[in-house]
Amino acid sequence: MKHFPIITFLLFFIILACTKNNEDQSSPMYENCSTLGRTVFYTSCDMPLGFIASTDAASWGNIISLYDRLAACEVPQTVLSKMTTEALAQSIAQYPLNYLIFAYNDPYSAVDFLVKNSSIHKEFIQREDNTHELIRLLSRATMKFDTKTNVSNTTPTLSYCDEMMLEYLMSSQEFSSRINIKDRDALADMILSKATERMSDTLHYSKHSIAPLAYIDTANSLNIIHLEEPSTKSGEVVSHITLSTPLGKPIHGFTRNEHTAKEIIDMTNWITENYPNAIIRGSATAKYNCHSYAWYDNSTDNPYWINQNDRSNVFQLSNYWTNDVYVSSDEASANRAFYASGDHSAIILSNGNYLSKWGDYPVMEHSKEYCPYSTQSMQFFKPRTTSCYTLQVSGPTPVSMNQLNQYYVSPSFDGLDYSWEVRFMDAPEPKPFDFSTYDNYSTLICKDYGLFKINVYGKYNGNTVAYGQLSVIATP
């Protein structure tokens, strides 16, 4: 079950009942009560809700956990049931947690989280005219960068983040399956208009901005948007690649089209405004994500995005900690964390902070809970310090004395550093041999007859995770 901790600096009061102008139960107007410390403002059943993120940005930015932020946006059912569907749609358009759309590895995970956990979204889904109002809002709305959403005008203005969330919501199964013939025409006009604008302005819009429109198009068989990449309707993915763990287990990754400079600036501003107490450590980018950064390559030159599941929808991240270079540990000794309920991975720094890539957003340094992810069912890992893999050492044996011989290790993992040693008759001294090493191979000249043991150690970050040995007999 989800737990909503108490936020000490907020009282979480909301209007449950206000004095009505008359006894008519159908009257839509309610007075705006002056309750101090409330987190959601409600003035009328036909007006959108106001949220603390807009009225008290400092308090919103200080809320630590994801579920505390969700709690700060909750509204009693007694209020929601009186609101018009249009007012609910407008409220969703400026919902404070819309920024999750770029924080998650899959945008639909963000949609799914809000649909399952937000009382506002739950109420909206139950309305029979929800798709009509959502299409109507998107058709009238203008998307702008560097702006706040304003739904009070006849022509609403939506921020880039809020627009993307609404479009992904529109393409989800809950809404795409409810579109009637009349709304279908309006939907087609909306998609064509927005897609034409974005596809003709590549300076401001990347193919990521076309993605939700393409998904709406596909879900309703409109056949409006056509992109050149056959592997994906949205054009987000450029190519697929099979990567590997340091010990050679397969990991599916892919490369993605990059966002425009304008989109990156807008995303950076969004995450800075919502998480002012976190520190940006790397630029926003579509090239790599949290799993790739934490497990594969923690550099900003990393070109690969890695999902927790492979293309067959099989969980693949465990390849890094099942007979590989990481092992399960307690939190105190860990240097990696997996947010099992949040589809997120992070590096744990020596100062106790976490370092992680927030979806398409920047690399952030943050506390464990001060992030857009659920901390339920977290798992912790540390580097392996014992060998778990047997290496094969190949080369000639027996050999003649004073002869140059080469020895190789297999498999030769790119993720490991190899260290070699040789011992004569199981003793470190004397050393009647010449021995040279070259990462994955070595050369040996035996200057006495007897038993020589060649040892090779495969190391990851200085720790031995693989080991191999070959006995070489030198004859007179």
Image (cartoon, rainbow, N blue to C red):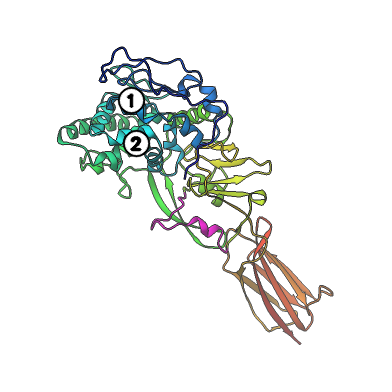
* Quarter where residue 470 is shown: bottom right
113 versus 160 height, above or below: below
179 versus 327 height, above or below: above
Q: Is residue 319 located in the magenta-colored stretch of the structure?
A: yes
Q: What is the total number of numbered labels drawn onto the structure image?
A: 2
Residue situated furthest right in the rendering: 430
Horizontal relation, residue 198 to residue 12: left or right: left
Q: Quadrant of the C terminus?
A: bottom right
Residue 74 in the image, given as x and y percentages of width and height? 43, 30
Q: Which residue is mark 1?
A: 90
Q: Amino acid at mark 1?
A: Gln
* Quarter where residue 175 is shown: top left
**Cα gap from disc 1 to disc 2, whole angstroms:** 15 Å
Residues 35 and 256: in front is 35
Q: Which residues are magenta?
A: 306-323
Residue situated furthest left in the rendering: 181
Q: Which residue is mark 2?
A: 122
Q: Is residue 73 located in the magenta-colored stretch of the structure?
A: no
Residue situated furthest bottom in the rendering: 476
Residues 280 and 443: in front is 280
Task: Mark 1 vs mark 2: give the one in front.
Answer: 2
Residue visible at 17% across and 36% down in the picture = 180
Q: Is residue 431 in view from this perspective?
A: yes
Q: Amino acid at mark 2?
A: Lys
Residues 163 and 300: in front is 163
Residue visible at 60% across and 49% down in the picture = 336
Horizontal relation, residue 336 to residue 206: left or right: right
SS assignment for the magenta stretch, majority: loop
Q: Secondary structure at mark 1?
A: helix
Q: Secondary structure at mark 2?
A: helix
Label 2 crowd bin: few (<14), some (14–19), many (20+), radius 10 Å: some
